[in-house]
Image (cartoon, rainbow, N blue to C red):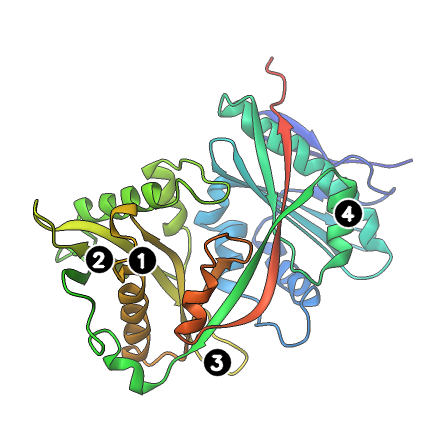
Amino acid sequence: MPQTRPVTYLGAPLDVTGLPEGWTARAPDEGDLPDVVALLAADRSPGDKPVDVPGVTANLVGMGSWTRRQVVVRDPGRRLTGWAVVHDRAAGRTSVEVVVGPGDDAERAARPLLAWVDATAAMVAALRHQPRTQLDANPPAQDVRLQAWLAEAGYTQVRRWLQMRRSVTPADRTLATDPAPRPGVHVRRVREHPSGLPVAADVQTVHQVLEESFVDHFNSYRESFGEFVERLREDPWHRWDHWWIATLDTEDGPQPGGVLISSVSPPDAAGRYGSYIDYIGVHRRARGRGVAKALLRTVIADTAERERHWVGLEVDADSPTGADGLYLSLGWQTEHVTQSWHRDVPAAPVG
């Protein structure tokens, strides 16, 4: 008979039902970290980047774990066969990740873990007093095995994302000023206090511009200022001095026209670091003014100045605006493709 082990969050018991006899499930702890890293490494394709161990650590047992509910599954021999994550991203939005080991045993863990994701996300929605939540899974395009399990569990593929990379050389250090931004466009770093913390008004400006810039984008949703800042601070590669604001000269004085948030990109197989563009947003008032190019050239130059070797980013492959064309024109190339699979689940009954 299948056996389960209760997993409890905030007093609500959630079981990973349907596991084979002798298999166990529980919330992870630091002792699981080496096995989780090994599980992720086994799930990678040849040529992929190494596992981001600091990032995994932050999400498994660090600050990132505060907004995530997780479970690990082990077989009777204590071998880690699966790991599932439900990330409480924002009201009505839940990011999910399910990783299972290779071989025939993977299917024994995948289906129970996806059912656990449903139950856990439903509980999260109830705790947020939301009637339902949207689940968002992001498998690589080549992972047909996981895609089949997602489809079976009721998910639908809704989008593709290009994971792009641009090499950076020392010659790129002048790119922020040569060529110069268009007249009336100015790019500056977010201001900092002597303590190294950013000036509140600038952080608030970045959040506001991003919220207003993405209103007409695919699957746009509101994220509170607190959720926005906390989520970025959870990332061990986040740096406050990687935030940029582009302003426009107007009759009413300088107005924010665009923003860019970047971070450190973990080292590749050769031990070389890069930068990563987490967000770039251009306000509707500034579109067609060269703001995006000015911000992108700034981060390329900053990456070169820091003696890093590339800049990575993600772009919507299915966007009607053809946004990837801008990146291609500035030297970015697609490394691989990921997908978005969505499923809506109603909130768990209360009481």
Give the camera-side residue of 188 and 110.
188
Residue 271, numbered circle: 3
- Amino acid carrying label 4: it is Trp
**Which badge, 4 or 1, is on the more N-terminal residue?**
4
**Which badge, 2 or 4, is on the more N-terminal residue?**
4
Q: Are marks 4 and 1 in contact (CB under 8 Å)?
A: no
**Which badge, 3 or 2, is on the more N-terminal residue?**
2
Left or right: 89 with respect to 98? left
Residue that label 4 marks: 149
Residue 2, numbered circle: none
Give the camera-side residue of 156 and 284.
284
Q: Is residue 10 visible?
A: no
Q: Are marks 2 and 1 in contact (CB under 8 Å)?
A: yes
- Amino acid carrying label 2: it is Ala
Residue 260, numbered circle: 1
Residue that label 2 marks: 246
Q: Residue at x 45, y 71 (%)?
A: 328
Tell which residue pokes out farthest to the right in this image: 1
- x, y percent for residue 153: 75, 39
- x, y percent for residue 3: 83, 36
**Which badge, 2 or 1, is on the more N-terminal residue?**
2
- Cα distance in 3D space between marks 4 and 1: 36 Å
Q: Which dot, 3 or 4, sits closer to the camera?
A: 4
- x, y percent for residue 214: 39, 44
